[in-house]
Amino acid sequence: MKVLALETSSTMGSAALSIDGKVLAFETSMNQRAHSEFINPAIDRCLQKANLKLKDIDIFAASLGPGSFTGIRVAANIAKSFCYTFQKPMVAIDSLTLMAIQARKTTGWTGPILSILNAYKNLLYTGLFSSVESASDEAFVFQTGPAAISIQDIEKHVLSLNSQVLCVGEGYLAYEALWSKNFRQKIRRESAVLDFPSAETLAVEASRRAKLNQTIEWNSYLPLYIRASEAEENLRVK
């Protein structure tokens, strides 16, 4: 099974190509304002590395967000176009879950995982994931979220738990100076864990879900816009 995965919902944009769950090509960029310019050449390079053409791809995958409104559309629109053109199914996974998967696979942590991305205006896109019995367990269940909530509300949720929480995401660094001492003592941070959702993880997870028939048609894709865009908020104020 050949999967082409695209992720542009955050500061890090990426493209990856996997065959039967093994990643053969991975391209990344940290220039968020240029994701639309980066992604098509990145796709070409992935295909060249794997010696494949677009028509050879079995599954196209894209992130649902949350994240940058424009960024979500970049990957989604390209993936949807490919699905429509080649009549192939699609896998869509939210960015918070992708980060939790990365964290668990990197560390083997089986306790709760907090994924946070900067939603700006003192808000964070948040997903708190439940504990699992083993690191190999593929089930990721939202205990809280996905939502855009304040630092104070995140701290309340975390401090109410009985165990430490593995925290992943650039949202932690964005508001690092504002976290309370009690919160810092409650969470665990691992330098080896990527703080952005990655197309590499998306490609592997999409392959697994496709084998379980957890795919959608391109026109069923619905982005995860948790809060109104800045333009919508400005219009509402007027």
Image: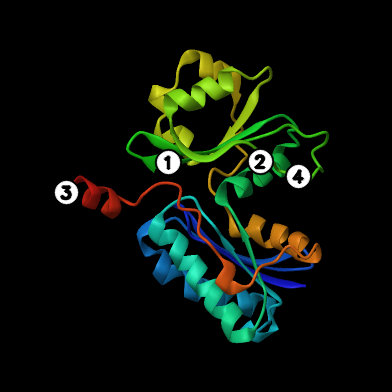
Please identify the quarter of the rendering in which residue 111 is found.
top right
Sequence-first disc among 3 and 1: 1
Query: For mark 1, what is the residue?
Result: 118
- Per the image, the residue denoted by label 3 is 238
- The x, y position of residue 237, in whole percent, is 20, 45
Residue at the extreme left of the image, as rendered: 238
* Residue 29 visible in the picture: yes
Which one is earlier in the sequence, the residue at label 3 or at label 4? Answer: 4
Q: Residue at x 73, y 62 (%)?
A: 214
Q: Secondary structure at mark 4?
A: loop
Q: Is residue 58 above or below residue 6?
A: below
Q: Nearer the viewer, mark 1 or mark 4?
A: 4
Residue to which mark 2 is pinned = 103
Q: Are marks 2 and 1 in contact (CB under 8 Å)?
A: no
**Contact between labelled residues 3 and 2, with CB atoms less than 8 Å apart:** no
Question: Could you give the CA–CA distance between mark 3 and mark 1, rounded to whole angstroms?
Answer: 25 Å
Residue 90 is situated, as x and y percent measured from the top left of the image, at 64, 70
| Residue kind at label 4, given as amino acid type | Ala
